[in-house]
Image: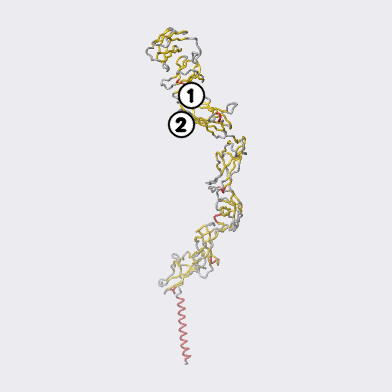
Amino acid sequence: MTKYHLFSASSAKKQALAFMCLMCLVATSLWAQPAQLTISLNDPTTVSPTKVYDGTTNAIVTHVGTPDGLDPDHIQVALNATANYLNPNIGGIKAVVVTYTLVGSDSAYYLAPQNDTLLAAITPKPLTITGTTLDSNKVYNGGTMAIISALGTPYGIVSGEDVHVSALARFDDPNVGTNKNVTVTYSLYGDNVQCANYIAPDPITLTANITPRQLYAPYAVLQGSKIYDGSITCQVVLTGMLTDVIPGDDVSYRATASFADPNVGQDKPVTVYPFLYGPQSANYTVTDTSTIQYTASILPLQLQVEGTVVKLVKDYDGTDTAAVVVRPTPTNLIGNDIVSFITEAKYNDAQAGSNKTITVSFRFPAISEANSNANYSVPDPFVYSDQGKIVMPIVIDTTAGRTGFIATNEHNCPGSQYNATFTLLQGSPVQYTVTFDDNALAEGFINTTNDIIMNEGSNSFNVVFDIPANCQPGTYNVTFGIINESLRETQYTTSFKVNLPSSYLVRAFNDVVSVDNRSNAFNTYQWYLDDNAIEGATKPYYQDPRGYLNGNYALLVNKGTADEQYICPITFNDQPTAAKTLVTFPNPVVNNATIKLTGFENQQHILTLYNSYGAAVLRTTFNGQEYTIDMTTLPQGTYMINVDGLTAKTLKL
């Protein structure tokens, strides 16, 4: 046999052997078929109910169920399970297919359980982002949108997917401010299906500034001038209109203007200060970019005054100047300004006369220390009065006496009045004053002021003052002031003598008046009746030949060689009575004096004996018409016997 045939024989044996084996396998197969496993209902397979989107269909098997149908002789088998969503996209209730596989030495005896279909969800995957930044400053534009300068890097997007992150930044409000909160919100864009599998990054809060919007002030129109008011304010007449204000914003514009100083001047530089107001004005700034130099003028403030007092009457002096008694006070000075000005008053002419117009005018001095004068102008002149008067000064007729007046009474007695007559050559007096020296004031004289009443039909008037009743005799000084219509006072000083009071004189008898000379001060005597010297009446007493005392009895006495004094008169008003006689004898008397009465009606009589000083040395009563007096003890001298008011003289040797 050839090798071929050997190979073939061998091959035939092999083929036979193979066939036999195949038949054995078929037989075995028909005798030992693998068992189908199932999942126990009591211990089923479970998957995670959710997963976060990750771009795959993989589901998470949380528990592999227990297989049912295992042969106790073949338990070396284990069950594996995998789970897959039908697609990787998010969904709330999605089918998950669980596929089982067997492992282990006995796994050939079994068939794996059939696929399970469960339900689970795929939730969107939250993305994160870092590094987002903003522009630090934004100019106000009325909106809240902030500017993102750099978008941060997102994390969590499955590689290769068409998913991208965008951002929007907004301030909490649109108004100007620093470090304002800005909320950055993110959104996704790209493939819509893929984008739906993600949650955009959470919003973040950043800070940024909103700066004011710059506006430019239009050219302003200023008031060309103002009156000085102590301030630097210049009034703006027109401000123009603003542009570039965000529509809808309530922003208004005004401007103020100021001088550099408040003082008067022409075309002074003015600075304009624009400013905004309104609900949204804080979101803007405004500046004046004008290159034009603003100017305006400050004009002097005219002074207003009150309180001017001008003397209406003056003495003629050949000028028309009137005297300003009270200078006026400015009523509209600004602040603490000090202004000095000169007030002048003038008559309409310089001639003497009445009903003259007096005009008051004002002027600033040529040189003034008050530096506020330049900011003011003087008040306008005004007519003060139309009742002005220029009078001729008082001139007394000095020919009427050494001092220009005559005292109308020669003797000034306590309790009486001093009276002097002034005669005018010129002028119109209205009042006189009487002013005494200190000695006179100490004696009770009173300074007085009285209106002058001219004596009727003459150019003279009387000046009168009272002499105090208790004034001591002596010489006193007095000054008379004659005041004319212009209130100018012309003074005349003189002295006057106050005489001895009438209390020095007493009634000695019903027809005898005597002087009290107990001090032996007087050495010469001259009696007066009704201001007329009585011839031969030069004794210390005077017996009126009429037999009674009626009239004013006065006495001029002398205390020395040239010290003549006047004793003021004592007044009696006796009237003639029925004839009565009183006879004394002998006369002169040596020892006794006998008196004999006739014409007396009463029987009882009062007898008084007086010495030559008027002092009573005896007083007694007697009845009848005859009585004898013992005079032996009396010194030599002259005595007066008075019976019931009737007096007789007798001489004692």
Q: In this view, does 141 lie above or below 582?
A: below
- Name the residue at the top extreme: 624
Work out whether mark 2 precedes mark 1 in sequence or the reverse, and give the earlier one: 1
Q: Which of 645 and 208 is in front in this view?
A: 645
- Name the residue at the bottom extreme: 1
Asked whether the viewer can see residue 121, the reply is no
Q: Residues within 10 Å of mark 1 (few under 14, many from 20)?
A: many
Asked whether the viewer can see residue 609, the reply is yes
Q: Which mark is residue 438?
A: 2
Residue 431, horizontal then vertical, whole percent:
55, 31
Q: Do the residues labelled 2 and 1 touch (CB within 8 Å)?
A: no
State the residue position of label 1: 413
Q: Which of 395 and 112 is in front in this view?
A: 395
In this picture, residue 632 sits left or right of residue 297: left
Q: In this view, does 294 lie above or below 32?
A: above
| Quarter of the image with the C terminus in it | top left
Residue 305, horizontal then vertical, whole percent:
57, 42
Q: Nearer the viewer, residue 394 or 443?
A: 394
